[in-house]
Amino acid sequence: MFEVMMRSLRAARLATFAYFALNGFVLGIWIVHIPAVEERAGISHAVLGWLLLLLGAGAFAGMQLVGPLADRFGARRVVPLSAALCAGALVLPALATDAWTLGAALLVFGLGNGSLDVSMNTHAVRVEAGYGRPVMSAFHAVFSVGGVLAALVGARTLSWGWSTTVTLTVVGLLALAVAAAAAPALLPATNATTARKRPATEATGWRTAPRRIWALAGLALLLMLSEGVANDWSVLAMRDVLDAPAATAALAYGAFATAMTLGRFLTDRVAARFGPVAIVRYGSALAAVALTIVALSPSIPLAIAGWALFGIGLAGTIPQLFSAAGHADPDAAGTNVSRVAGLGYLGMLAGPAIIGPLTHLMPLNYTFFLPVAFCVVAALAAQLLRPKGEATTPVAPAVSHAG
């Protein structure tokens, strides 16, 4: 019986890796083809910027809808359906011919992406509980690897002259096949997940969320906004502040993304030894120091090193927040993950809206002191990841010594 449980848990972990990689690959392929989609729709950069907000709105809506559904019906049912929606909607932007159709396509695609994001993280929480040790960060690392592979594949198909419609259709079909193949290995819903009826006093709406979940969600907002600074402004800061050539400036984001991916592969072992509180506390502190180096750096190499350290610092923070939210109440894991992921995602979207206007008041590199302050707040509030009365990691082992 024990060996059967071990095999089932390992298979579920591999299936979860597949869904994280699928999500990263699908998003990466979309990003690579944004210029072609913009040209086909005949819209300006400004219009595209507004339409991308619909992608974010759809993702946020998907997160809030799917979280409770995963709690009610189990992630084994919801994850494959969310993946199918995300994969199937991938081709829609390529078919858009104007701003209206592109906006509708992005809304649906965002809905699928948000649904998959929360449902696969909810299942990852169950897998982590089965292992009895941290495994969440590795899933997020594989998501990043999926994005890198998508960039390489997208560059190749573009060089071959494939149309955007053909590429997105092929990738969507492959993603559907992967989602279907991985589905049987997902963990079945527990009786508590499918049958437990909460009294009215335990409603799971946003207004009745436990204070600790709101606190975790607030930390996610601060840290994901800080992460978004690297995504949105690292290359531009290198060019505008340090006069770096375009090719060299691109190394700033490359250093950040590579360091974050590698850091996530290492975080689980560190978290198993020192606990999630230490990961968030010292990771956020390192991120604050690193971004300060970037803001004050007089040289290009030092700035690139600062962006790399920033990636290492932030690497394990968000996975720990998702994990803590999911383990806080196993019967409401999906709902709680959706709250933390939802506010975190809003933080990522809010970054350009906050940093952009500040550049009218001060140089771009000085605006980075705002996310530095956010990272300091996260470091000081890291104790929130530890439930009351618990001295170590909140992961409760269900199967010990799993490989």
Image (tube, rainbow, N blue to C red):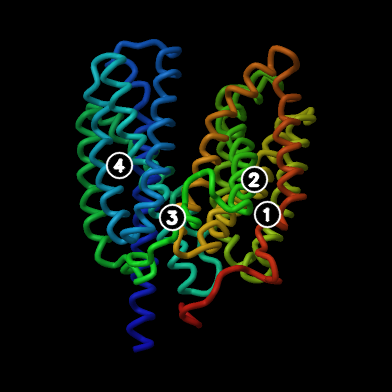
Q: Which residue is mark 2?
A: 219
Q: Secondary structure at mark 2?
A: helix
How far from the left and from the top, in percent, is residue 349?
53, 30
Q: Is residue 208 left or right of residue 212?
A: left
Identify which amino acid the numbered label 3 is placed on: Gly
On residue 280, which mark appears?
Answer: 1
Q: Which residue is mark 4?
A: 86
Query: Quick one: label 3, few (<14), some, or many (20+) residues within 10 Å?
Result: many
Q: Is residue 342 left or right of residue 113?
A: right
Compute the Cα span from label 4 to label 2. 27 Å
Name the residue at 75% across, 43% down. Answer: 377
Query: Quick one: label 4, few (<14), some, or many (20+) residues within 10 Å?
Result: many
Residue 220, relative to residue 352: is it above or below? Answer: below
Q: Is residue 215 left or right of residue 49?
A: right
Q: Which residue is mark 3?
A: 334
The tag earlier along the polypeptide, 4 or 2, is 4
Name the residue at 43% across, 67% down. Answer: 127
The reply to whether the C-beta atoms of the residues labelled 1 and 2 are less than 8 Å apart is yes
The tag earlier along the polypeptide, 4 or 1, is 4
